[in-house]
Image (spheres, rainbow, N blue to C red):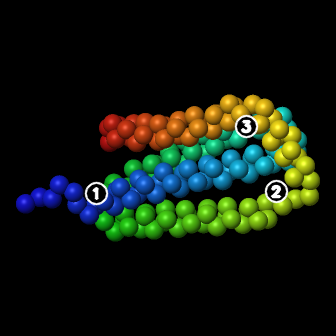
Amino acid sequence: MNKLITKEHLLFLVVGGFSILLTSELANFIGQIINQFLIFINQDPLLVIIVKEVVQLAVFIISVHVILKLITKQKVLIKDNLIKLIVWLIGIYFVIQVLQVLYGIYGISSLEGYREATINYSEYVKENYLIISISSVVYYLQRLLFAISIVNYTLKDD
């Protein structure tokens, strides 16, 4: 009797789950760096928000396509290859987590003058709090684009 859900199916779910976690964390990390840098050099707060979100979206889309290319370029995905891919995805994910912690400690926010630069940005956000809704729109747009990318790859002819 054939099983409806095999171990390989579960491994594919793990690959998908860690792929979306990895791409989201990478995009957020790079967006955070861009955000803090633009605040530090006293750019217009609206520009800071827009550039951060555009960069995050671009990094997310590019990283999703890179991961999909790596997965689909293999002719046969056997269980051992899936496990190696999962180990790599989890490893890269944790490296990004460590980099985020180190950046939080030693990054731009630790530089002299960063606190003063955040005052203008914070005041702008307090007065224009609806502009922050861009972040939530971009978050859901990322998820939608992830789903579209997956569907697009599954519909392509081999």
- 118 sits to left or right of 102: right
Residue 92: percent from left, percent from top: 55, 63
Residue 140 position in % (x across, y down): 52, 38
Answer few, some or many: residues within 10 Å of disc 1's Cα (few below 14, many 20 plus, some between 14 and 19): few
Location of mark 2 (residue): 108
Tell me which residue sits at (84%, 46%) in the image. Answer: 118
Could you give the CA–CA distance between mark 1 and mark 2, rounded to whole angstroms?
43 Å
* In contact (CB < 8 Å): disc 1 and disc 2: no
- Tag 3's secondary structure? helix
Closer to the chain start, of discs 1 and 3, is 1
Q: Nearer the viewer, mark 1 or mark 2?
A: 2
Could you say whether the residue bearing mark 1 is in a helix, strand or loop?
helix
> Which residue is tagged 1?
9
Q: Position of residue 41 (x, y in %)?
A: 88, 45
For marks 1 and 3, give the CA distance.
39 Å
Q: Which residue is mark 3?
A: 49
Q: Is residue 58 visible?
A: no
Amino acid type for the residue under numbered disc 1: His
Depth check: give the residue in front, 79 or 144.
Answer: 144
- Circle 3 crowding by C-alpha within 10 Å: few under 14, some 14–19, many from 20: many
Specify the amino acid type for callout 2. Ile
Mark 2 Cα-neighbour bin, 10 Å: few <14, some 14–19, many ≥20: some
Residue drawn 31% across the image and 59% down it: 10
Q: Between disc 2 and disc 3, whose residue precedes?
A: 3
**Three-letter code, disc 3:** Ile
Point out the tag, 1 or 2, that comes first from the N-terminus. Answer: 1
Residue visible at 57% across and 34% down in the picture = 137
- Image coords of residue 59 (percent x, y): 61, 45
- In the current view of this chain or complex, which residue is farthest to the front? 126
